[in-house]
Amino acid sequence: MKALIIISFLVAITALGGMRRNPVPHAITSPGKHFVFTMVPGPANQEHKQGFGICYKIASDGTFAEIWRTKGWYSEDLELHYDGDLLVRIGSWASGDQETNLGEESLAIAFYKLGKEVVRYKINDLVKEKDKLQYSEGGLQWLIYEGFASPGFSSDGKHFRLKTIDNISYRFESSTGKIVYHQK
């Protein structure tokens, strides 16, 4: 009986994993933990289009000083740079960036400097083998999230890296978002 309950619980969790969750306020910190970025959804029915974010510097006494803001979008998948000046937004269904009628034209990744968008890429800009894309209730899977291949900044902070579902490794210059390397 316990095994049946555990299996039922695991099936329910797996089934819910692909469902879009209601956007909620959340925060991330920079790798050095000196900066925090808060993300707030917009009002009902405009959560993704009217959301905003604020980046703060954390002082040695624990107080926060605002350094920049974003507006007009909401995301759950974000990476904040070590220096707090740069932010990378990774498009996802949960973040409202992948509308079902847009598919490959949806946002893949966007780079921000001091809250202003620098450059953005669509999924079809980065994924070359469209047959590898995985469509499900959870949206369009275009990234590989595993170990070293997870999206993130390099240890020196100069580059942002990710790996697409068709096994192309990309390296972007952090400050400009320009692709400086890609290889399958």
Image: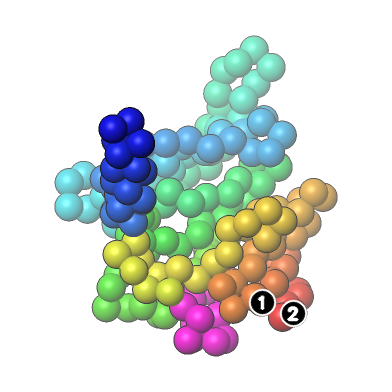
Distance from the alpha carbon under mark 1 to that under mark 2: 5 Å
Q: Which residues are magenta?
A: 118-133
- Above/below status of 26 relative to 104: above
Q: Secondary structure at mark 1?
A: loop
Residue at 48%, 35% (x, y): give it.
Answer: 27
Residue 71 seen in this snapshot: no
Q: Image quadrant of residue 135?
A: bottom left
User: Above or below — where is 33 with respect to 14?
Assistant: above
User: Label 2 is placed on what type of residue?
Assistant: Gln
**Picture quarter with the C terminus:** bottom right
Task: Describe the element under mark 2 as helix, strand or loop.
Answer: strand
Q: Which mark is residue 183?
A: 2
Give the camera-side residue of 60 and 47. 47
Taking 59 as reference, is 50 above or below it? below
Contact (CB < 8 A) between labels 1 and 2?
Answer: yes
Label 2: few (<14), some (14–19) or many (≥20) C-alpha neighbours in 10 Å: few
Drawn side of residue 73 relative to residue 56, left or right: left
- The residue under the point 22% across, 53% down is 46
Residue at 33% in and 31% down = 2
Estimate the x, y position of residue 78 in percent, counting from the top left.
Answer: 52, 50
Which badge, 1 or 2, comes first in the chain's sequence? 1
Label 1: how many Cα within 10 Å (few below 14, some 14–19, many 20+): some
User: What mark, if any, has residue 168 been given in the picture?
Assistant: 1
* 11 or 91: nearer the viewer: 11
Up-down: is 68 above or below 145?
A: above
Asked which quadrant contains residue 35, the reply is top right
State the residue at coordinates (17%, 52%): 45
Tally of numbered discs: 2
